[in-house]
Image (spheres, helix red, strand yellow):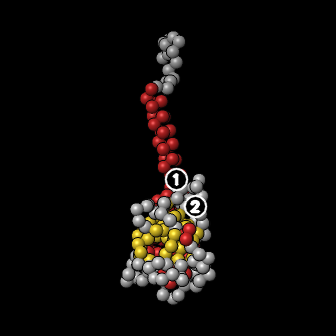
């Protein structure tokens, strides 16, 4: 009688190189799918840099073109609306394009987002190194914007919001605007 088995060899098949390759390909495909799917699934719950960039530009445009200026003269800031925006004790007039008492309400952001809005001197320096300004109502027109170091007690500091934390990444939007006949930087920082 002859057996289908040869001496010492079993007819059961072992793992071949092709089987191993197919298994590795399936594993890597599954792993790549997980890495591609998980960030998309979590995106509605965490905000990344791209969303912050869109938000900070929206806020800067809104302030420079509508909230602090007349819609017919964008980038030319209204003195009354600008001072009221930066002075929490002043109620904005109806001609201003914002309302509310907190910065978040005035620019339309949630309290979970941190923002800082400043007006800085323009000139040769960049908007990061240029001096912060304040508004001095008692000075004559054209001289009411002074560097923060030269402000007296009655002046309104043109800065509102939290101070950015150095360990957190920030996004910044800058607009060159006119206030009191001078070109200045309107700087919005979001983190």
Which of the two marks, 2 or 1, is nearer to us in this view?
Answer: 2
Residue at horizontal 58 percent and vertical 61 percent from the top: 164
Disc with the residue nearer the chain's start (2 vs 1): 1
Give the class, few, some or many, for how many residues have Cα within 10 Å of label 2's Cα (few <14, many ≥20).
Answer: some
Q: Residue 34, image x and y in percent?
A: 52, 47
Can you say whether 143 is above or below 162 in the image? below
Residue at horizontal 50 percent and vertical 84 percent from the top: 80
What residue did someone put label 2 on? Answer: 164
Q: Is residue 126 left or right of residue 85?
A: left
> Residue 124 or 88: which is nearer the viewer?
124
Q: Residue 134, image x and y in percent?
A: 53, 73
Give the class, few, some or many, for how many residues have Cα within 10 Å of label 1's Cα (few <14, many ≥20).
Answer: few
In three-dimensional space, the C-alpha distance between marks 2 and 1, rounded to whole angstroms, equals: 26 Å
What residue did someone put label 1 on? Answer: 39
Q: Are marks 2 and 1 in contact (CB under 8 Å)?
A: no
View extreme (bottom): residue:
94
The answer to whether residue 57 of the structure is visible from this angle is no
> Residue 15 or 171: which is nearer the viewer?
171
Viewport quadrant of the C terminus: bottom right
Q: Tell how many labels.
A: 2
Q: For residue 148, what is the image quadrant?
A: bottom right
Q: Residue 170, image x and y in percent?
A: 52, 59
View extreme (left): residue:
72
């Amino acid at each position: 009688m002859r057996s289908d088995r040869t001496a010492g060899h079993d007819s059961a098949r072992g793992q071949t190189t092709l089987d191993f390759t197919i298994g590795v390909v399936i594993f890597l495909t599954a792993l790549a799918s997980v890495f591609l799917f998980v960030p998309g699934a979590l995106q509605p719950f965490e905000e990344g840099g791209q969303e912050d960039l869109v938000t900070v530009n929206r806020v800067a445009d809104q302030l420079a073109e509508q909230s602090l200026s007349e819609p017919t003269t964008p980038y030319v800031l209204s003195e009354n609306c600008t001072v009221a925006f930066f002075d929490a004790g002043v109620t904005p007039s109806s001609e201003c394009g914002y309302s509310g008492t907190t910065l978040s309400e005035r620019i339309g952001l949630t309290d979970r987002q941190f923002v800082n809005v400043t007006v800085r001197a323009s000139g040769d320096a960049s908007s990061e190194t240029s001096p912060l300004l304040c508004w001095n109502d008692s000075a004559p027109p054209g001289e009411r914007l002074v560097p923060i170091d030269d402000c007296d007690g009655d002046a309104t500091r043109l800065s509102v919001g939290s101070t950015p934390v150095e360990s957190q990444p920030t996004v910044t939007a800058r607009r060159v605007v006119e206030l009191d006949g001078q070109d200045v930087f309107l700087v919005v920082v979001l983190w």
